[in-house]
Structures are given as structure tokens and as C-alpha cells.
Amino acid sequence: MKISVITPVYNAEKYVTQAVESALQFDEVYEVILVEDKSPDNALEVCQQLAEKYDRVKLFQHPDKENHGAGPTRNLALEKATGDFIAFLDADDYFLPNRFDAEKELFKDPKVEGVYGALGVHYYSEKAKEQYYKLFGDNLTTVYKRHDPKDVFPGQLNMKGSFGLFSIDCLTIRRDSMVKKLKPLFKTHLRLHQDTEFLFRLSYYLDLYPGILDKAVAVRGVHESNRITAVDSKKVNPAKTRVLLWKEIHDWAQNENTIPEDVKLHIKRMHRSYEIALAPALKKWGMITKYLFTDYKSIRSGIYNINFRDYLL
């Protein structure tokens, strides 16, 4: 296996060395592609030192050397990657020694286009733990049982009951399959949830298989300045960002002729339920009243599948 590890770097000077060295422990890792996205800290200097120290580390920036966000940054890294397989690693996370154990066996079968596993959590400080323990706990982010590839896409849509989640840090993909079947790669206009939207489309077009689900193969590093924890802790309204995510998924699904109509309707209802959650109070309750009579399943999608009750008042 020749694996290219894709690592966007932003505001991660304290963590990127650990991330890179956790990837370099594997002989299968052919290269680590760092794309520094105009960090406000000294991450660029740290990345330069890593590229000088390790032959397998390759450092890039955007041509204008400006900040473009995670989506365009991952896309640039994918353009530069030359390995047969792609793995992703955020600059404040890290791989565990079992990261590619399942992949080494599963990818012997040419029909396996991707493998996903379980993500653990590590708090870099007591303050981070105090702030975010209620959000992450000590739990694995994982899919709860082993699914056939055809069930991964509807599972993520909450059409199969309790499915669980997998993280992009725990995903390995055949590069050729991804390039041929997924266009565009990461959506460049999404500032948040680019990876979630990417995983939805990827699981529809590619056959993704379960790897190690009962223990972590990578670790999410939680710290005070982590962008996604700021969103999930409601410093940014998560309902608003989810509306944008589900609108993106809805628009894609409506234009994809191979998606069954019942699946398109489910996606429409998921999008609608977030719109209801975000609407101003008077409009919100008007929409709820309307859909209770005309499309009750839109309300049910919100209350039972998305749990948007926190945003009803």
C-alpha cells in the first residue's frame, strides 16, 4: 500500500508535529501532505521544520498564500497526492498504531473502495475537558454494527435506525475510485461541515466497508481553539450550520437521478426540519402547525432523528 495522508493545517502549531509523526510510524504511509492555510500562529514554521526533517513530509500553501478554509485546503492536498490510497488526518488529531490494520487486509479485495473505523477522544487540557466533556465524554465515535456498503448511505441519513458515525480521520479510500466517481471533491463554498457533506456523497458513490469499530484507530484532539468544538458548544448556532449542510445535500440529491424518490423525500424532510428549527419564533410555530397537518414526517424527522428540540423556543 502507498498511502497519502492529507492534513490541512490551521492554527495548530502545538499539535501538528504529533499528528505528522503519528502518520510516519507506518511504512504504508508513502507521504504526508501538509497544506498550511495562513495560520495566525507559528504553524507554518513548524511545518517547514517537519518538511526539512522528514523526506515523506511535503508542505504546500495556496498560490496566493491566503486563508481558504478546510475544503479548498483538502482539495489542494488531494491534487498534490501521489499515493494509491488516501487517508485524512486533521492537524490537531493523531493516528494510533492499529490505524491501518484492517485496511491492509480489506484492500486486498479490489471491490473494497473505502474502509472506515472508530475515533477516540483526547483532551489536551483540563480546561478543554471542562468545556467539552459533556459533548464528547470518553466515547468512541463509531458505527454501531458492521453494515453492508449499500446500507452506509441510508444509515447516515437516519433511515436505518441507530447507525452511528464515522470520522474522516478514520477513513481510507482508493484514490482512483474517489477521483473517478466523486466530483467535486470537497465543496469549496462550505466553511463548516465540508467533511460531513463529503462523506454523504462518498458513501453513495463508493463501496465503504467497516474496519475496526470497537476500539479507536485515531484520536480527536480537543482543545479550546478547535473550530468544530466552538460550533458544537453553540458559540456558533449549530442549527444554522446544519441548515446549510442539509440544503447542500438536498440540492445534490435532487439533481442525482439515480437516488430513489423516497430517499430524496427523506432528505427534503431532514432539511426542512432544520429550517423549522432556525426560523424566528412566530414563523417557526406557523411552520410547525402547517406541517403537522400537511407533512407530519418533517416534524418527526426533526424531533426524533435530529433532536432539534433545543432550538424550538
Image (tube, rainbow, N blue to C red):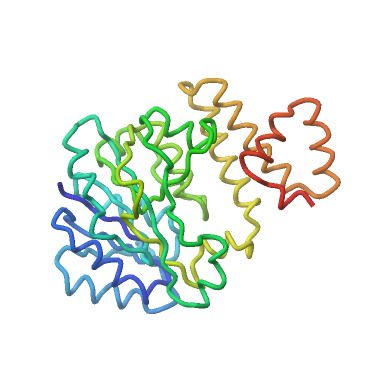
- Of residue 194 and residue 189, the one placed in the foreground of this image is 194
Q: Give left or right: position of 10 versus 85.
A: right
Where is residue 78? Give x, y as percent.
30, 50
| Number of numbered discs on residues | 0
42 vs 226, left or right, is left
Q: In x, y percent, where is residue 170?
A: 34, 51
Q: Is residue 257 above or below residue 138?
A: above
Residue 74 in picture, x, y percent from top left: 37, 54
Q: Is residue 219 above or below residue 257?
A: below
In the rendered image, which quarter is residue 124 located in? bottom left
Could you tell me which residue is drawn at 45 percent across and 33 percent down? 153
Q: Quadrant of residue 59?
A: bottom left
- Indicate the position of residue 8 as horizontal and vertical percent values: 36, 61
- Residue at 51 percent of width and 31 percent of height: 160
Residue at (52%, 27%) from the top-left corner? 255
Is 92 in front, or is 178?
Answer: 92
Q: Residue at x 73, y 42 (%)?
A: 276
The one of 123 and 20 positioned closer to us in this rendering: 123
The answer to whether residue 217 is left or right of residue 275 is left
